[in-house]
Image: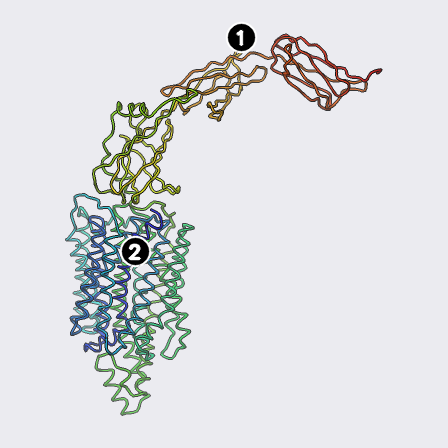
Amino acid sequence: MTHRQIMEALSGLLLGMFAAILSSTIVTNALPEIVGDLGGGQSAYTWVVTASLLTMTASTPLWGKLADLFSKKVLVQIALCVFVLGSVVAGLAQNPGMLIGARAIQGLGAGGLSALAQIIMAAMISPRERGRYSGYLGATFAVATVGGPLLGGVITDTSWLGWRWCLYVGVPFAVVALLVLQKTLHLPLLKRRVKVDWAGAFFVTAAVCLLLVWVTFADDKYAWMSWQTAAMVGGSVVLALVFLFVESRAAEPIIPLRLFRNRTITLASLASLFVGIAMFAGTVYFSQYFQLARDKSPTMSGVMTIPMIGGLFVSSTVSGIVITRTGRWKSWLLAGGVLLTAGLGLLGTMRYDTPYWHIGVFMALMGLGVGMMMQNLVLCTQNQVAPGDLGAASSVVTFFRSLGGALGVSVLGSVMSSRISHYAQDTIGQLGPRERAAAAEASGSGAIPDMDLLPPSIRTWLESAYGHGIADIFLYVAPIALLAFLVTLFIKEVPLRTTGALAQAAEETAGAPAPQPSAEDAVNRTADGAGADATGTAARPLSAVAGTAHAEESAGGGFPVRGAVRGADGAPVPRAAVTLISLGGRQLGRSVTRADGSYAVDAPGAGSYVLIAAADGHQPQASTVVVDGEPVTHDMLLGATGGLAGTVRTAGTGLPVPDAMVIVTDVRGELLASGSTGEQGEFAFTELAPGAVTVAVNAAGHRPRALPVEVDGTGVTRVEADLETGARVRGVVRTPHGPLAYARVTLVDAAGNVVGTATTGTDGAYAFADLDGGEYTVIATGYPPVATALTVTGDGTDDHDIELAHPGQ
């Protein structure tokens, strides 16, 4: 597919991703006000974030497996509709519980969109080219991420709108995305009998949900070391073991366990887990830091996160472009791990009064690291799997990243609450008695405080506690980012493939071959289209006429071009290479014929293309194929190649002539083949086009000879070349002073024809070879010319010296 065709296909997908990300990020800076307006506390704030991550994590493997079984286009539209439904319900929320439930619905849709976006890109685009388009996806992510909080802040700060409109603003974008997806995204549906692993989906969801419920309420409703912890952790382990048992016996497992035999997939999944913890936990609490520790409005909170989003935008785009050009991706993973670790570690040093430009630099480092790692971990995984496992493998990496984010947000949210309380208690002694009572009431209610309503001294005290407590979150996450870096050290860099998953599927799992012509039909078509040119050259058979096939789905995307490759005798030609190129010379698809000669390639759209077929022992052929929006059947007939062999001998004696040069040219004088004879005078050439050729033979001591030969296309044509031995004349041109250099010697036969000319060397010598027997005249110039008669016997060497002198010498 051309760049334009790919971008048209991705336009709706990118717009859908933009709508989903915008709807998700637009509430980021509004969450403190939303949760406070609904009467929720810090636990509700954490659970609002965790709910969407929980359902997104649990549903990601199921979306990925469904993408391997059903229409990817329909699935991404369903995911978008689910996300919009969740957004609308969230906008109508009347209490924290209803908001959390709506966020869970949003997570289901987000899980589908995040998994399917990567899967669809991998299906259409080769790993080598995918870096470029992953950069576009990263850019979309960055624009929506930076635009969402800004737009959400403006809406929240606008009195006549309010925070509920933050949840409605994504609906128009989603509707447009649905319409564009319907028009621009055309993916094949691989029809096969399927069996969805519902049991696996249930047990993996139950295991993840129980684990996330435990970490969410730990240290709030019960202690970390309690019977509730033992019950929930033990239950999660049991459910996980049951899931592994079910997957090992499922016909179509959600997560094929054999994938983890691949070292790259295992390490990439583990690294994604750590990156998820660092990325989500590091970004979720920025809005609380800026609004509660620095007393900024929701709008300004969004503006202040631009350095992080800018770093993500730059690194994802630049790394994608460079990876496409170089094919090298591991160095970007390693650099991303270093930058992510450094950024988080430096963010752990911030306080409520840290200069903003310091924080901006730290956030930029973090964003650069996330942009380099997030997409490329998916890329290196997709490069390792077959087309049939693409969805499952992609969703595995996304699953572990989401799982890490959910665990990180849940655990670190609880840790942050305790750290804020700790720092608040440590510094409460700095307040007066009356202020202490007010401070205790503000911090002990469990709700997120409204800083604008607090006295200046209490507000500064609470801002310091929030600033220090949130900074500790980044400090705790930095070692986890370091673990991600260490894991990527052991990922082996494998060269990126240059074919997309759909192109691979076209070669490996193309459908049944199109109806094939009989041998008689093939011969008749060849005879009808063949002729002879003015020189009698046999015309080569060209491809047969293309016809429209029955409409059917293609395994390779676009419009299928199928048919059979046959030889001139009508027999199928196996393992022939069939290549589809655009009129501009760009390769669009390639296939190798099966044992029955069938092939299948996919044209990206309606238009004219060039189809080329080539095979050993046959003449390559090219023909134009016109695709008018329907599948096409196009059979290719390859002209046979003939062989030419023979022996070069000496005329009269019959002795073989070794090391003779044999040259084969066509009627236009184009060189077709050349070579030297062996010890027995033998020579042989293969893969010559049938028709008239000229065989020229030349050997030392023999007269050259040219023979017209008709090469047969069904076997080896024999040629016997007899060379006449040639006589040789040599001599020295002398003067009274010695040998004469640079004298001109001309040999003329009895009919007056010039046979040859020669120029003497410094020793005055000259020579003529390959002469017939007879009478000759030798003319030498340089001094006054001298003409002498010479009789050549027909073989051997004749000596003939010439004396030149001026008159009187």
x, y percent for residue 131 = 37, 53
Query: Image quadrant for the C terminus?
Result: top right
314 over 384 or under it: above or below: below
Which residue is painted at 50% across and 20% down in the image? Answer: 662
Query: Can you name the residue that lies furthest to the front here?
Result: 534
Q: Camera-side residue: 423 or 125?
A: 125
Query: Can you name the residue that lies furthest to the right here?
Result: 808
> Which one is earlier in the sequence, the residue at label 1 or at label 2?
2
Q: Is residue 13 left or right of residue 676?
A: left
Residue assigned mark 1: 653
Q: How many marks?
A: 2
* Residue 210 visible to the viewer: no
Q: How far separated are the C-alphas under marks 1 and 2?
A: 80 Å
Residue density around tag 2, few if under 14, some if 14–19, many if 20 or more, within 10 Å: some
Three-letter code, disc 2: Ser
Q: Camera-side residue: 653 or 178?
A: 178
Q: Which mark is residue 749?
A: none
* Residue 121 visible to the viewer: yes
Q: Quadrant of residue 426?
A: bottom left
Residue density around tag 1, few if under 14, some if 14–19, many if 20 or more, within 10 Å: few
250 over 646 or under it: above or below: below
Three-letter code, disc 1: Thr
Q: How is the image coloured?
A: rainbow
Residue assigned mark 2: 11
x, y percent for residue 777 = 68, 12
x, y percent for residue 638 = 34, 28
- Check disc 2 and report its element: helix, strand or loop: helix
- Check disc 1 and report its element: helix, strand or loop: loop
495 over 228 or under it: above or below: above
748 over 401 or under it: above or below: above
